[in-house]
Amino acid sequence: MHAAPPQTPVVVLAGFLGSGKTTLLNHLLHRSGGSRIGAVVNDFGAIEIDAMAVAGALGDSTVSLGNGCLCCAVDASELDVYLDRLTRPSAGIDVVVIEASGLAEPQELVRMVLASENPGVVYGGLVVVVDAAEFHATRARHPEVDRHLAIADLVVVNKADRAEDAEAVLALVRTLVDGAAVVPATYGRVDPEFLFDCRPAAERRGQLSFDDLHDEPDEYPGESGQGPGSGTGHGHAGHLHTGYDSLSVTADVPLNPRRLLEFLDSRPDGLYRIKGYVDLGPHDPRNRYAVHAVGRFLRFYPEPWPAGAPRLSRLVLIGSGIDTADLGRELEACKDDAPHADEHGMWGILRYVQDPDEDEPRPDPGPSAEADPYGDDSWT
Ligand SMILES: Nc1nc2c(ncn2[C@@H]2O[C@H](COP(=O)(O)OP(=O)(O)OP(=O)(O)O)[C@@H](O)[C@H]2O)c(=O)[nH]1
C-alpha cells in the first residue's frame, strides 16, 4: 500500500456577481494565520480589480486566467497547469481557492478539480456565496441559483447586515441545499477553519495536526468570543464565530470499518468537514487511514503507521447546526476491540480509497454514488 502523497485542498468559490466572493477571499487571505492560500481568479469584466486586490495580498501566488469565464474558456488541462504550479511542494501553499466568475457554472469547475490528474490535488469543497439582501431578486432572474445551492458543500449567506429578512433567507437557503452547511456572514467573515486547516507556518504541509485547531493564537482582537463551538469544551478565542460547531475525538480502541462507514454515509446535514485518521485494528494492522470529508465528498488515504506512533484514532468534525454530543455517541459506538477482522469488512472503506495509479477511486462494488457526488449527469 502506498503512503498518501501530500495533498493540497482545492476549494471552488462561486456565487453571483457582487455576492461577495472577492471580499470573502480577501478575508481568508488576511485571516489564515500561518497558512498560505494560492488563488486562481479570472479576468472577466471587473475581475481585473479582483485579481489586483487578491494579488496584492498574495504576492506571487496568484495565477490570473485572462480569458474570461473560467468554466467555458479554460479546459481541464489548462487548469491543471495552474494547479500543478500552485500545489507543488516548493510553492508552500496550503490551500488553493479558485474564484469562479460570477457567471461560471460551478459544477464544471468542481468536475475539473475532481478530474485533475495531479496526485497533489484533493477537492476541498464548493463554497457558494449568496447575497442575502438580493437573494429573492437574484433567484427570480437566475433560477439556476437553486442548482448551484443544491450541489454546494458550504453556503455563505453574505451581506447579513444589508438584508431585512436575513433569518428568512437563511431558512430558505437551508431548504435548497442538499446536506450543505449554511452559515451567515457579513463582509465574507467566515472562519477559515471551515475551509481548510489553518496551521502555524512552521508546521505547514506536515501531518494533520489536531492541536492546531484549538491552539491558535488570538489574532483577531475585537472579534473573539465564545460561540457554539465552545460547547466542545475547547477555547475558541480568536475564531470568528459564524455558528459553527466542532468536535474532536480520540479513541484508543480501533474503529470497526463497517460501523464507521455507516456513520459516515449517514452523516447529518451541516457536518461540513471531517479530518483526521482512524485505526481499523485487525482489518489493516499496518496502516492507519487518513479521513478527508468535505461536504458529501469523502476519501480515505491509507498510510503506514509511523514507527512508534500510538495506535489511536483522531478525528475532528466541523459543521453548522450539528449535534456534537450525538455525533460523539455515534462514533463511540464504532469502537470495536474484536481481535479478528470480519470478512469483507473493508469493502466499504476501500470504495473511498484512491488508487495512486488511477485517476478515479476504485470501482464501487456497492450502490452508493457518494464517491463522486457530482457525477450526476442531471446537471449537464
Ligand atoms: N454591506 C455589505 N457589503 C458587502 C458585503 N460583502 C461584500 N460587500 C460589498 O459588495 C460589493 C461586491 O463584493 P465583491 O466581493 O466584489 O463581490 P464578488 O462576488 O467578488 O463580485 P464579482 O467579482 O463581480 O462577481 C463590494 O462593494 C463589497 O464591499 C457585506 O457583507 N455587506
Image: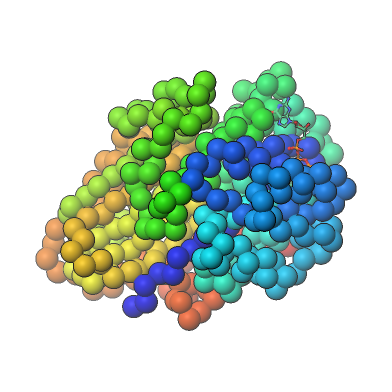
Residue at 29%, 58% (x, y): give it.
278
Q: Does residue 265 appear in this view? A: no
Residue lying furthest right: 45
Q: Give how far across and how far down residue 329 sits, in percent.
A: 26, 41
Foreground pick, 139 / 281: 281
Residue at 85%, 51% (x, y): give it.
44
In the rendered image, the vertical position of residue 155 relative to residue 377, given as above or below: above
Q: Quadrant of ligand 1?
A: top right
Residue lying furthest left: 339
Q: Is residue 122 left or right of residue 288?
A: right
Number of on-image labels: 0
Query: Image quadrant for the C terminus?
Result: bottom right
Q: Give how far across and how far down residue 157 sits, in percent.
A: 64, 33
Its colouring scheme is rainbow
Q: Give how far across and how far down residue 254 sits, in percent.
A: 20, 58
In the rendered image, the vertical position of residue 192 relative to residue 207, given as above or below: above
Q: Give how far across and how far down residue 183 sits, in percent.
A: 57, 33
Residue lying furthest bottom: 357
In the rendered image, the vertical position of residue 313 relative to residue 178, given as above or below: below
Foreground pick, 188 / 255: 188
Residue lying furthest top: 164
- Residue 128 quadrant: top right
Residue at 77%, 66% (x, y): give it.
74
